């Protein structure tokens, strides 16, 4: 009788461990799938030193997100030195700085000068309205270089500049 109880105990432990291993395998499979999905998400990063350009860039990024729902778009704002450092490090695919900037722009990048009219914009569907004080057109320099997101970059440049880059 002792052998039957011992054998039954071992069988119960084996069945329990088999069940737990199945649960663990299912959990790890879900984690692996989520990581693969995140790895497949493309990030498109824009950095600018000019607040007045945010409405135009934001509208273009909304269009890109509508056309490419798997693309995650980021817009960063900072000083020209920070923006260029981000560009040099590869953290930004496109940077937009003042056209008369004294920051060195010959960094193996393509560039184009554009002129944009300042626009007011709202945040959170009109809760915060950002009004522009500057009324004169703003001259900006757009810089980009070849990257993994080349088609997104060219689409963005085309939309921002109104012509092929």
Image (spheres, rainbow, N blue to C red):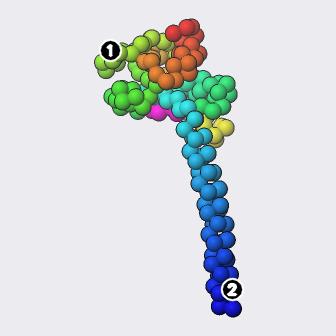
Within 10 Å of disc 1 (Cα), the crowding (few <14, some 14-19, many 20+) is: few
Left or right side of 76 for 1: right
Q: Which residues are magenta?
A: 73-77
Image quadrant holding the N terminus, namely: bottom right
- Residue beneath the point at 64% across and 66% down: 18
Place of residue 85 in the rendered image (x, y in percent of width and height, measured from the top left): 34, 29
Question: Quadrant location of residue 160?
Answer: top right
**As rendered, which of 156 and 125 lies closer to the eye?**
156
Question: Quadrant location of residue 141?
Answer: top left
**In the rendered image, is residue 121 in sight?**
no
**As rendered, which of 104 and 144 lies closer to the eye?**
144
Majority SS type along the magenta span = strand
Place of residue 39 in the rendered image (x, y in percent of width and height, measured from the top left): 54, 38
Q: Nearer the viewer, mark 1 or mark 2?
A: 2
**In the rendered image, is residue 158 in sight?**
yes
**As rendered, which of 120 and 107 lies closer to the eye?**
107
Q: Which residue is mark 2?
A: 4
Q: Which residue is mark 1?
A: 106
- Residue beneath the point at 55% across and 32% down: 42
- Asked if the magenta segment contains residue 100, the reply would be no
């Amino acid at each position: 009788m002792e052998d039957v109880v011992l054998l039954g105990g071992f069988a119960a432990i084996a069945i329990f461990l088999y069940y737990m291993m199945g649960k663990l395998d299912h959990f790890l499979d879900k984690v692996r799938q989520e990581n693969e999905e995140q790895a497949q998400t493309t990030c498109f990063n824009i950095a600018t030193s000019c607040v007045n350009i945010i409405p135009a860039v934001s509208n273009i990024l909304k269009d890109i997100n509508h056309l490419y729902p798997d693309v995650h778009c980021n817009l960063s704002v900072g000083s020209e030195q920070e923006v260029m450092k981000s560009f040099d490090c590869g953290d930004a695919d496109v940077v937009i700085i003042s056209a008369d900037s004294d920051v060195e722009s010959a960094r193996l990048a393509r560039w184009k000068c554009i002129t944009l009219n300042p626009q007011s914009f709202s945040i959170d569907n009109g809760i915060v309205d950002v009004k522009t004080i500057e009324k004169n057109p703003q001259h900006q320099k757009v810089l980009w270089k070849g990257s993994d997101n080349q088609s997104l970059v060219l689409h963005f440049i085309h939309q921002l500049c109104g012509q092929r880059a």
